[in-house]
Image: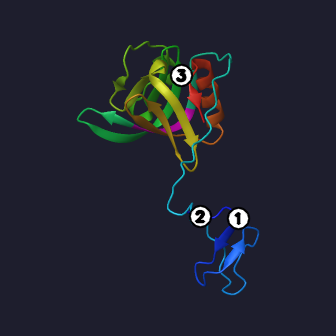
Amino acid sequence: MPSTTHWNCPSCGQLYRLDEPACPVCRITRENRDVIGKTSVVRAIEKEAEDVEVHLPYVIQEARFNIPVPGGQLVWASGALAAGEAGFFLVSDKDGRDPKEVALARPLVPGAIGPTSYFIPAASVVRVVHERLIGYWFELKDRKIPLRLPKEAWDELDLLCDHFGIKHT
């Protein structure tokens, strides 16, 4: 059991007070043996949704997203992230549809709304994560949908999350 008042030099075995940062004989710095090998999970602080007013439909351009397509494959697509009363629409440029018109639709379930476009109901989003060292995605109950946006667009997405009552980082 590690001492709470002293530490042992791992090389020469001498005892030193905890305020001594290194062994003066071996020049080895103190090691916290009780911490070595234990991992700590650093979690991003989730922000609770605030009460904001957003005029829908709202479109964020230059979005890239990884969506499931028929056949069980995942495909990266680029286009726009549109928000409507029903939720979020990942609208691919390849589909040639206007994101504002697509956002006026009210699909009931998440799924494809075009060959490379996808709908996510706001009620099915658990949280939106955008932390550089953790990742960028929509977190649903059963999966994550990776998302890439320009830096300034994340603030806009945070406002949309607040509007829908979704936690975000």
Q: In this view, does 72 lie above or below 87?
A: below
Q: Position of residue 94 (x, y in %)?
A: 40, 34
- Which residue is tagged 2? 2
Q: Position of residue 149 (x, y in %)?
A: 56, 40
Q: In which quarter of the image is residue 26?
A: bottom right
Which portion, as a residue range, is magenta?
61-66
Q: Tell me which label, 3 or 1, sits earlier in the chain.
A: 1
Q: Which amino acid does label 2 sit on?
A: Pro
Using the image as rendered, state which of residue 95 and residue 164 is in the foreground. Answer: 164
Q: Which of marks 3 and 1 is in front?
A: 1
In the image, 20: left or right of 10?
Answer: right
Q: In this view, does 117 lie above or below 84?
A: below
Q: Is mark 2 on a helix, strand or loop?
A: loop
Specify the color scheme. Answer: rainbow
- Which residue is tagged 1? 5
Using the image as rendered, state which of residue 122 and residue 64 is in the foreground. Answer: 122
